[in-house]
């Protein structure tokens, strides 16, 4: 009886070991052959912004006086070069209706703004991606729009006194932390692809967002009189419009 019990136990242990070994070999094979991966197309969203163009000129220096005035109040004062013409932007908006409202208000206050429609280029990725890779890549390609929306909301809350400067700075810190996570995950997962095709373009875009947010949370103003609201708007203009 004792011998039978020992023999049964040994057979059971051997069987479990075999099952574990087979399971390990199967999982290793599946991972190495990419059977857990799926073909996917990951694109940044089609993105159009509507900019409030306060003044345009063939010479950027002609815009400096109004640029300083904007940055001393709540305007971005961002100089955008389009087809060799310089446009002084007060802010940018995701929909034309908001831009039209701002344009009307500015006209009522004696300005002569125009609305500049700007299409933001998209990035497209096709290939075999695991679920984790798809999540990380999707967050990365949407980072520009995600950060813009976050900063836009912070600026609106500050301008309408829903929040004060201290709260706005805390929210900007949180936005920066979110970007750091997105960027770090992308660099970790796709470390071997950062120099190839659209991966390199996306990496440079994330670097641009990171650098501009760093200047924002450090409160690196253009002039000593630039407001924090202006700095936020200038930051998201740079994030969206800088190449």
Image (cartoon, grey):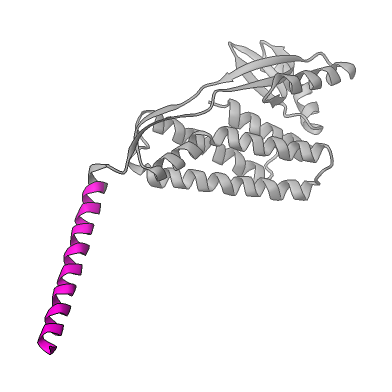
Residue that protrudes farthest toward the right in the picture:
109
Q: Position of residue 177 (x, y in %)?
A: 58, 49
101 on left or right of 11: right
Residue at 60% x, 46% y is 176
Left or right of 235: which side holds 132? left
- Magenta span dominant secondary structure: helix
Q: Position of residue 7 (x, y in %)?
A: 11, 80
Q: Is residue 25 magenta?
A: yes
Compared across the picture, whether 239 is left or right of 205 comes to right
Residue 25 placement: quadrant: bottom left
State the image quarter where residue 23 is shown: bottom left
Q: Nearer the viewer, residue 156 or 113?
A: 156
Q: Nearer the viewer, residue 36 or 183?
A: 36
Residue 214 x/y as whole percent: 60, 44
Residue 27 visible in the shown view: yes
Q: Which residues are magenta?
A: 1-30
């Amino acid at each position: 009886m004792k011998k039978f019990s020992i023999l049964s136990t040994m057979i059971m242990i051997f069987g479990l070991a075999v099952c574990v070994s087979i399971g390990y070999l199967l999982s290793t094979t599946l991972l190495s052959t990419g059977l857990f991966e799926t073909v996917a197309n990951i694109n940044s969203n089609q993105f159009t912004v509507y900019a409030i163009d306060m003044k345009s000129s063939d010479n950027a220096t002609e815009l400096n006086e109004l640029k300083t005035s904007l940055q001393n109040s709540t305007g971005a004062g961002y100089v955008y070069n389009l087809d060799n013409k310089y446009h002084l932007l007060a802010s940018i908006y995701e929909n034309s209706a908001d831009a039209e409202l701002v344009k009307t208000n500015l006209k009522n206050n004696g300005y002569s703004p125009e609305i500049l429609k700007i299409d933001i280029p998209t990035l497209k990725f096709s290939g075999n991606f695991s679920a984790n890779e798809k999540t990380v890549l999707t967050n990365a390609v949407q980072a520009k729009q995600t950060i813009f929306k976050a900063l836009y909301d912070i600026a609106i809350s500050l301008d309408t006194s829903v929040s004060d400067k201290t709260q706005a700075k805390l929210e900007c810190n949180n936005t920066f932390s979110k970007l750091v996570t997105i960027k770090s995950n992308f660099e970790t997962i796709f470390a071997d692809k950062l120099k190839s095709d659209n991966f390199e373009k996306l990496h440079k875009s994330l670097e641009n967002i990171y650098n501009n947010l760093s200047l924002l949370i450090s409160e690196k103003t253009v002039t000593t009189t630039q407001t924090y609201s202006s700095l936020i708007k200038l930051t998201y203009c740079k994030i969206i419009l800088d190449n």
